[in-house]
Image (cartoon, coloured by chain):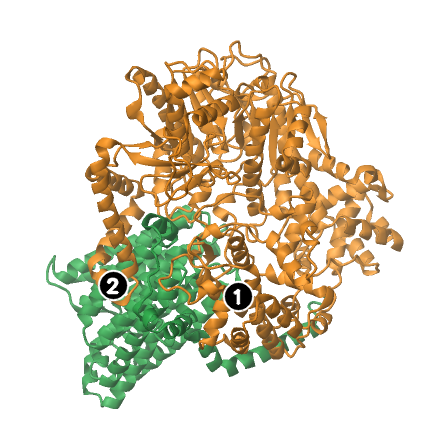
Amino acid sequence: MTDLTAAALVLTVLLPAASALVVGAWVLLGDERPSERVTRNVIGAGLAGSLLAGLVVLAGFSGLAGAPVHGDVSYGDWLRIGDFYIPAVLRLDGISVTLSLFCASLTPLVARFSRTYLHKEPGFVRFFTLLGLFATGTQLVALAGALELFFAGWELIGISSAFFIGFFHERDEPVRSSVRAFATYRLADAGLLIATVATFELLGSARFSAFQGAADLPPSEATFLALLFLLSAMGKSAQLPFSGWLPRAMEGPTPSSALFYGAVSIHAGLFLLLRAWPILEPSLAARAVGVAVGLVTAVYAAAVVRVHTDAKGALAHATLAQVGLILAEICLGWTTLALAHLVCHALLRLGQYLRAPNTIHDTHRFGHAAHAPSRLERWSPRLAARLYAAALHRLRLDDRIDAAFGPVLAAARRLDRADRWLRRTATFDGEPS
Amino acid sequence: MTGARQHEGIADPIARAVDRAAGVLPGQGPIGVFVHHNTLHAFQHMPFHQGVQAGAAALGARPYLTLREFRAALQAGRVADADVRHEVARTLGADADGPVLPSLTRAALWHTLLTEACEPDDAAGLAFTIRIGAADESRDEPRWRACLSRVARGPAPRPPAGPPLRRHRDALVVLGAGDPDVPVHAELIRLGSGFLDQGQARAVMPRRDLGFLRAVAAMYADGASAPRACRGVDADLRQVHAQGLDAATVIRESLLALSVGGDEIEPFLFATTLALPGWAGMFSRLERHPADHPDGPPASLVDFVAVRLLLERRAIERACREARLPSPWPVLRALVPPPAPVPHVAAAALLWHVSRAAGLTPDEVTALPDDTLATLWRECGACSDVRRRQVFQDAYERTYRRTILDALAARRALPPAPDAASSPGARVQFVFCIDEREESIRRAIEEQHPGYVTYGVAGFFGVAIDYQGLYDREPTAHCPVVVTPGHEVHERPIYTELGWHRTRDRARQAWLWWERRALDASRTLRGGAGLSFLWGPVSAARTAARVVAPRSAMRVTGQVKAALAPRPSTRLSSLRADTDAVAPSSGKPMGFSLEESVDRVATTLTNIGLVRHFAPIVVILGHGSTSLNNPHESAHDCGACGGRRGGANARLFADMANRPDVRAGVRQRGIDIPPTTWFVGALHDTADDGVTYFDLDALPTRLATAFDEASTVLERARRENALERSRRFDDAPVDGTPDEALAHVEARAAHLAQPRPEYGHCTNAIAIVGRRELTRGLHFDRRAFLVSYDPTQDGDHRVLERILAAVGPVGAGISLEYYFSSVDNERFGCGTKLPHNVTGLIGVMDGHQSDLRTGLPRQMVELHEPMRLLLVVDAAPDALLTVAGRQAEVAELVTKHWVQLVSMHPSTGALAVFEDGRFVPYAPEPTLLPVVERSRDWHMRTRDFVPPALVRSALPERVVGFGHHPAPVLAEQVTA
């Protein structure tokens, strides 16, 4: 029985990866691009297989057939250089099984939606291939038994997410937004990468099962580690001050917005913290920072929702507010509540995102609600007006980050000018262009 | 440059530029009610070609399809080569035969330039394809080498003009500096959407009732921070606030700061106003139609431009500073280099194609004298890209026009039916909207028996009303947008249902209140958390059900609702017995008086020529469309009802026509509706092909059998209709049964993810005004508006005038909206639907912020063939001229060629096309039409367009004239 569970476990991860690989290889090597039908069937099979395997894992985990399987399931080494090795290990516990099943059931639903929604779209094949990659990423993040594998999944989520934002790359704005999201993700990645190395150094292993050892670390080291994890989570989950990319991420097709920013991707930072909880737990300083960041983000996002006039942007910030709350819950130590909140919240938002284009219809049904001035507006119109402006401009977060990176950008501009000068002076292939 | 007529009186260049721009900006109102109109309505006073070119230039859009698309149409046979030659000759007139080269006439040169891809836009790409031997030019290497060497010796062709330089931004982009529009638009969109919001956000922009400029200035005076790229604008706005400057002053000062003066002011400001056309257009639209947002703030285009210029000035200064460029406009503009010379490869490619057409040998090419080559370049330059596409457009339309006119002539050549259509033999009569989407269902009805007769009339059935349904919040106009209804009609529960109605309404209001609360609450901190736990899993299950099994989910919901809370029976308040009963809100008369009812019924029946031989059942069908997740839903509703559903109008008309006192009045006007006839109002849903009947409880029992027959006919017809529609959806099976097709279209309409619930007016191309006898049995592939009109009953052309006054503008509006949205879907249309994001309840943006997208989405126009409406009228040329003389708007559409008008003489059938200001007789090619037993046999062979065919079972008498083919002979022509 253990063998069956172990096999199902690895299939949960590998099936979507394999389906994305098949379609990808077809695109690269085939004479013509795969048809919509082939694409959606291959990827659909991968996603459905992943869900089935996930159910088998659930059965094994809960002991429906034979003894329950818990803890690490090892598949040998991913990489071995001398004494150094990276284990290929998946982990079975309450959190991982919940998250894995949760992602494995939402992704096929979104795939079914997209099959109709993206019909005849030039990027159809690209969309579904990315969906396969994304599913692999989420399964890795949910099931990884060590930080290295987790990091691989984290990267897959990041890269597919950036590509989804820039899906309509024939226009400028999606590309700009995609780059901004990608850059923010890289910052989060850097945090996670350093954290991985540091964990390995300090605890001797990057396995989650070794994280219990953090209790014995000196407080400064534990806090350092915890803060690194927190930083990664903040970037990935768009907590302040990294919230600027989230509304911009609404550039992609509606179902990808739903899956990423409503349901799964936005919560990835929280997955990380749930996983790294043993490291976070002893560090009260890091937890205090986490609670503060979460609550401030929640208040900020709730304020922005009030002034947001576009359906998807408002939803993005409504989501962000809850993500901030969940972050605070985790850092307060209420991990079970946080997990339940996370799953229920994602389920709620998924439907709301998918129905975002229906806003006008809904309003006709409900009728226009007369605007009632809030308490603040009655008490101090001036303060309310300032708050309105601040929320409308989203605190100019992007501008502030741009200003912080000003010198780098200036250098880039100088390089660009040099490049243009070179192109003007040099000719190509003897042919004046 | 454009539409300057009405603006010339304005002395101030600023006011003139903004006024001119206001005419060009998209006129689309808030998207909740979508009305099709000519996208370039401001240019309608100019001839078509001139107007589209001027309008496209002003908006930076394409006036026609691209040459590549036209050439593909030529390849596919959608344009005939003969028509291209014909139109080239017509355009060139007497110059056509002039020699350009000794062996090449001007017409031949133009034909080559039109049909062959001889001017590559990508010289490097061409050089590469030639090197690997994959280009056209590689087919004749010696010639290619000769051309290349000849071109290298000069003279060079004149390079095409670069992008127009009208504003700083144009120059900055060419010079490689940052685009100042990016930060300006980002800020402007946020401010503008907050200002115009109709209730999507919970907070309202403070002090927005002061107008845009003042509200924004006040916001900055309160301490809002400026965007980084527009630093300094906060101080400017504080100054505006402190000194109470008005928009004109602000604009003047901004222009001064940007060193734009004198003659440059107008073009600069015109282009600046058009730089964000969707939002600027919405400000302008709401300024002119304040009724579009009842509680909204005072919108003003000048305010918008003033705020824009304040931001733009600072952004330009910053962009110039960063790129080390000067910001005064004359200095900056002078820095832009002239357009690069045409690369040799490109010039050689042009010469290669032309020399082949002229039959020159490579040696002759090498020996071409300089002045001959210069002449050739000049001639090629005269046949510019736009000119070529203009000629192609004419040819494209001509090909289709010939097909249709030949088919009409062939149909007319059939022996006339022994008994006219509205003969005593009519078993059921169906009155539809003229909409081209109803062409197929009418055909499907007529195929079932010669006694099933259909009529077409503008879908408000002559009753222009403000209608308030049982659960509508307020009355809305159900009539063409040019008409203001004089009457209000309400739907009310019948007496015995009053109690149930009150209970149900209370429950419904409570439910909606909760639903709305929940929606709002889910976005707050506490509410979001609470609802996540309470509602999240349920909501996900519901979503899953609706995504996986949309049709069943919808059906189950409907059944549960009908079982628990059935809708109460209702009647319309159609009769105004008490002459001064008025609607409380509007003060309009409530319902129609007896004389008014008589007048409406008699007029509509006369219009369609249904004045005798009434069948026992006359079904009046309005139409509408239901779809989910579709901000453009209203664009699929009835255009003749102002973008709303026509069910209420059909119901009202039937109700009036059934009243004995009305019938008595109508009888006095010579229309004798027998007591054995009953009118039934109904609504045809063009998305799921459902049919809903109204007031069946009033149907006389003795007519039950007759009605059963009518409804059976419709049941069969709507299934056939679903099948015919399915063939155009790539993801629908074509080998299914009509029942399966019906299930398919029902699932489409119920699907949350469906961007194409129906194709709407896509592929519309023809409008035929005339007797149905002349077209019955012809397969028009859902492309023809069919308007019933009987010229034999219309001596003074008054009926024709009424019809053309309604049909001309509505049909042209739809056809031109589709034209523009498909020739340039990005500029005139609103691009792909997939990233659309509803904003402020007034429109959609792409993604998180973009211009407000107006026009039609790609998913609605992707099958469309953009051409002007072919309006064929069953009337003599002089009758048409008389009517056009009386109706200014029709005259403008016709004489400026925004529609193609064709006269089909009522007695002789002679065809005449209105061309270059007069009717030119058209001699139809003798055509043998393919004949099929049922239309399904014809259209289900392909998903593509099908040419006209004769449908034998729909012909009034079941014989077909000599010589027409049985269809299979032509099967290959269809699929080829």
Residue A228 pos. (x, y %): 32, 81
Q: Position of residue A375 (x, y in %)?
A: 30, 69
Q: Quadrant of residue A253?
A: bottom left
Q: Indicate the colour of chain B.
A: orange
Q: Quadrant of residue B873?
A: top right
Instruction: Tell me the kind of residue under disc 1.
Output: His
> Vertically, is B124 above or below B390?
below
* Element type at mark 2: helix
The count of marks equals 2
Q: What is the residue that sits farthest to the top in this orientation?
A: B418
Q: Nearer the viewer, residue B98 or A215?
A: B98
Residue identified by numbered label 2:
B527
A268 or A142: which is nearer to us?
A: A268
The residue nearer to you, when weighing B43 against A249, is B43
- Left/right placement of residue B714 relative to residue B413 reads left
Could you say which chain is coloured green in the image?
A
Residue B19 in the image, given as x and y percentages of width and height: 62, 56
Residue in view at x 58 percent, y 33 percent = B805
Could you classify mark 1 by the number of other residues whose Cα lies within 10 Å: few (under 14), some (14-19), or many (20 or more)?
A: many
Residue occupied by mark 1: B185
| x 59%, y 72%: residue | B178
